[in-house]
Structure formats: C-alpha cells, structure tokens
Image (cartoon, helix red, strand yellow):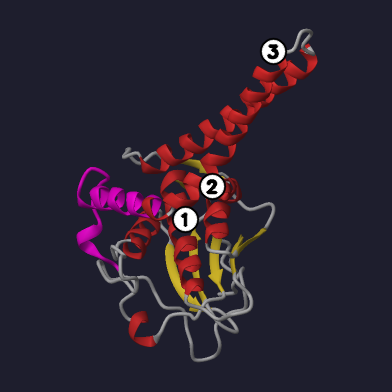
Amino acid sequence: MTSVCGPPGPPGAPAQPERDVPELRADSGGLHGRMLQVSRLATIGEMAAGIAHELNQPLTAIANYAQACDRLLGKPNPDLSDLRGALREIATQAVRAGEIIRRVRTLARSQPVERSSADVNTVVKEILELMQTDARVHRARLRLELAEGLPQVSIDPVQIQHVILNLVRNGLEALSGSNSAVREVQICSGRTADGDVEIAVCDSGPGISAPELERIFDPFFSTKASGTGLGLPISNTVVRAHGGTLTYRPNQPTGACFHVVLPPEAVE
C-alpha cells in the first residue's frame, strides 16, 4: 500500500498489523465503552496545560476590552463607536472561549456511537486548534497535507477525532526525547491504491524499537512512565469497529507513522 504521508517503510520493514483484542470488543455501554472514556479523559488530561493556555487568551482579551470600556465610559463624552467596537470584541472572544470548552466537552462526554456521513478533512480540522495548542506546548510544528475530493466515510466523528488526537499526542511526546533538528508531526489524508480513505500521522522522533513494536497494541503496555497503555489499543479497537485498520510503519529518515485506513461510504 502506498503511504499518503511520508515515504513508505524500507524494504524488509512491512507494516506492523493491528492486533485484534477480543476483550475490548463490546458495545459502547460495555467494557470497550468504559475504557474508551478512560482513554479520552487521559488524553484530555495530558493536554490540560495547552487547553488552559488556549482558554487564557480569549479570557485575557475579554478582561482587557472590559477595562477599555470602563475607561471609555469614564470620559465626559465617550466615543460610542470605540465602545461598540470593544463590546463586539468581548462578544467575539467569549464565543471563542465557549467553542474551546464545547470541543473539550464533546470529546470528554460519554455518549452512544452515532455514525454519520463525514469528510475526514473536516473531522481533522475541527480539532486543529486543540492539536496546534498541544504542538506549541511541545515546541513542535504541526503540518497538514489534506487531499481534496476524498469520498465520504461512515463514522462516529468524535471517536475518530479521539484516535487522531491520541496519535498526534503520541507523536508530540516522542519528540520530547528526540534530538532531531526537525520537530514536526505531520497529518495527511488521501486514498490508498485500493480506494480506501487514509489518515496518516507521522512524527520525526526516535521511532519505535523492535521490542516495543511487538507490544504497542497490547492493552496497558506503555512506553510512557505515566501512560495508561490504553491509547493505541483503544484507537485500534475504534478503527476496527469502523471496518478499518490501524497500522504502523517507520518514518524515514527517522520517526513513526501510524496509518488509519477507513472504507469509503457505500454509494447506493
């Protein structure tokens, strides 16, 4: 299969297949649903510093514009146009803060699976701000290469967004232990040779060692000291539940690439 993000793995380094984990395959109200919720909350908790920073910006702007309004109203003949402009900015920043909170609540909320026809590029862009904030915290660059004209897929957008967030978060954390001059996580979308839709997340970190590679999809196995070991197994289970696959390939010249492949929506 041709990769849509970064060069394909070198000869002799085939894609690492996802592993079927029967004990995680259950309905959204069973074991799988509970573990998915734990994984979501763990991912959001790890992103807390970035989310707090992202919220602080509009809140600071609201405070500054409110102080400006107070100063304007203290003048004998306040300029009403300036006052209206400041109030509009307060409203804009309040909406921005509310949107950040809405995105986090949507990702954190336990909810039944709701599949719908979706465009994977839109699914990625809806969480772009959260991912960019996390990238800034890690002093890294987030780069998007999204192909146009992709077919729709039948997915639960929130579940697939959780998978993408988890893969990006893993890539950013891998960069923390890397001496690479290029500190970057790349998200690409495209079509495979078989016509499926692919989302690939690649980093320029140290990659995954052979012993770790054997266990990356095992529940509760983590290379992070404080990791839950649920991110990749849960992501794998979510993708498989959507009829897709989650595979790993080494990035070139260094790093890791995870490929989410989803079948296109059936055309009636």
Mark with earlier residue (3, 1)? 3
Q: Secondary structure at mark 2?
A: loop
Taking depth in this image into account, of 226 and 194 the one nearest to the observer is: 226
The residue labelled by disc 2 is 127
Graded by Cα atoms within 10 Å as few (under 14), some (14 to 19) or many (20 or more), the crowding at tag 3 reads: some
Vertical placement of residue 28 versus 68, above or below: below
The residue labelled by disc 3 is 73
Taking depth in this image into account, of 241 and 162 the one nearest to the observer is: 162
Q: In 3D space, how far apart are the residues under numbered discs 3 and 1 (Cα atoms)?
A: 45 Å
Q: What residue is rendered at 54% in x and 34% in y?
A: 97
Label placed on residue 98 = none
**Residues in magenta?**
20-44
Q: Amino acid at mark 2?
A: Ile
Mark with earlier residue (2, 3)? 3
Q: What residue is rendered at 51% in x and 38% in y?
A: 100
Compared across the picture, whether 204 is left or right of 24 comes to right
Vertical placement of residue 253 versus 86, above or below: below
The residue labelled by disc 1 is 165
Q: Secondary structure at mark 3?
A: helix
